[in-house]
Image: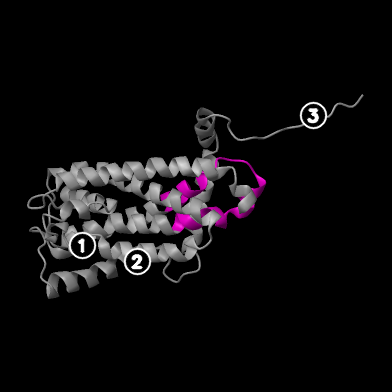
């Protein structure tokens, strides 16, 4: 008598099993992240240098417009450093939204054929954007050397604000990755969100120019607190952190991350069918 054995692969039935599966599939995470890093600039003439050129040129334009022409305050720091201290977290957030929103669709063949925790895919996209973030940090270091700018003790708190930026990027990325599978319109909406967000976030200027009566409302944009935190850590000295607004932004980042994970987990079982 021939006995047939059937192997059934199914998703973790509990949250604990699911997060254990993410650890088990960590090699897939490494593969996806490394593949995207290699492919991103593969056929370009100057390769990964593009990760430095784009934020640098944006910094130059903002420094001229807001620093030279508008003559906005820079909290005692050279204006290019003020701009780039805001450009770093914003660029990380914007790139994460763009990459994560397309990540599930880009890996549709893999998702429809093999079980693994789908959360691995958008997380790997955020990590790729984080690599660009680290590379762009070289420009900030170069600016500090050029202007003989020495940060204060606050610089040791920078990893905390990097973690907050990572949480904001993950939260926004997971929401858009999930929504883009269900509604393909989001591939056209995401560039608008990124462009509009750049204008309403204090990237080219200090949030201190916003009137005191409006600052708490302005902090409803979670990236305001993230950018202010970066500048507080990097610029030190005369740059002050608006604590009520930062706490509000921090709470919104936490809410964004938690809600995105819950929504992603809710929709995850439908991805293979819809995609």
Which residue ends up furthest to the right in the rendered image? 1
Which residue ends up furthest to the top in the rendered image? 1
Is residue 196 rendered to the left or right of residue 261? left
Percent position of residue 186, x then y: 48, 61
- Nearer to us in this view, 97 or 129: 97
Q: Residue at x 36, y 62 (%)?
A: 194
Q: Main secondary structure of the magenta part?
A: helix
Work out whether residue 49 can be spotted: no
Disc sitting over residue 5 in the figure: 3
Which callout, 2 or 1, points to the residue nearer the camera? 2
Per the image, the residue denoted by label 1 is 83
- Using the image, determine if residue 69 lies above or below residue 250: below
In the rendered structure, which disc, 3 or 2, sits on the residue that comes first in sequence? 3
- Dot 2 crowding, Cα within 10 Å, few <14, some 14–19, many 20+: few
- Tell me the quadrant of the picture where the C terminus can be found: bottom right
- The Cα–Cα distance between marks 3 and 2, rounded to whole angstroms, is 55 Å
Callout 2–callout 1 Cβ contact below 8 Å: no
Disc sitting over residue 195 in the figure: 2
Does 112 lie within the magenta span?
Answer: yes
Image: magenta residue range: 99-128
In the rendered structure, which disc, 2 or 1, sits on the residue that comes first in sequence? 1
Q: Residue at x 55, y 44 (%)?
A: 268
């Amino acid at each position: 008598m021939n006995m047939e054995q059937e192997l059934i692969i199914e998703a973790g039935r509990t949250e604990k099993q699911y997060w254990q599966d993410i650890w088990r599939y960590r090699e897939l995470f490494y593969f996806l992240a490394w593949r995207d890093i290699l492919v991103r600039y593969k056929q370009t003439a100057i390769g990964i240098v593009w990760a430095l050129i784009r934020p640098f040129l944006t910094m130059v334009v903002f420094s001229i417009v807001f620093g030279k022409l508008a003559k906005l305050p820079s909290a005692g720091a050279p204006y290019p450093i003020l701009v780039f201290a805001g450009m770093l977290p914003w660029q990380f957030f914007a790139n994460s939204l763009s990459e994560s929103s397309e990540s599930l669709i880009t890996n549709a063949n893999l998702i429809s054929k093999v079980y693994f925790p789908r959360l691995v895919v958008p997380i790997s996209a955020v990590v790729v954007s984080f690599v660009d973030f680290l590379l762009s940090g070289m420009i900030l270091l170069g600016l500090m050397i050029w202007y003989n700018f020495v940060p204060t003790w606050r610089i040791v708190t920078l990893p905390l604000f990097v973690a907050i930026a990572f949480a904001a990027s993950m939260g926004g990325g997971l929401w858009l990755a999930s929504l883009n599978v269900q509604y393909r319109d989001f591939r056209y909406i995401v560039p608008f969100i990124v462009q509009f967000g750049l204008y309403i976030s204090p990237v080219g200027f200090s949030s201190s120019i916003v009137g005191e009566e409006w600052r708490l409302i302005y902090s409803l944009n979670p990236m305001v607190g993230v950018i202010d935190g970066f500048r507080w850590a990097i610029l030190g000295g005369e740059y002050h952190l608006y604590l009520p607004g930062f706490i509000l932004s921090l709470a919104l980042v936490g809410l964004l991350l938690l809600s995105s994970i819950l929504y992603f987990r809710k929709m995850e079982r439908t991805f293979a069918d819809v995609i």
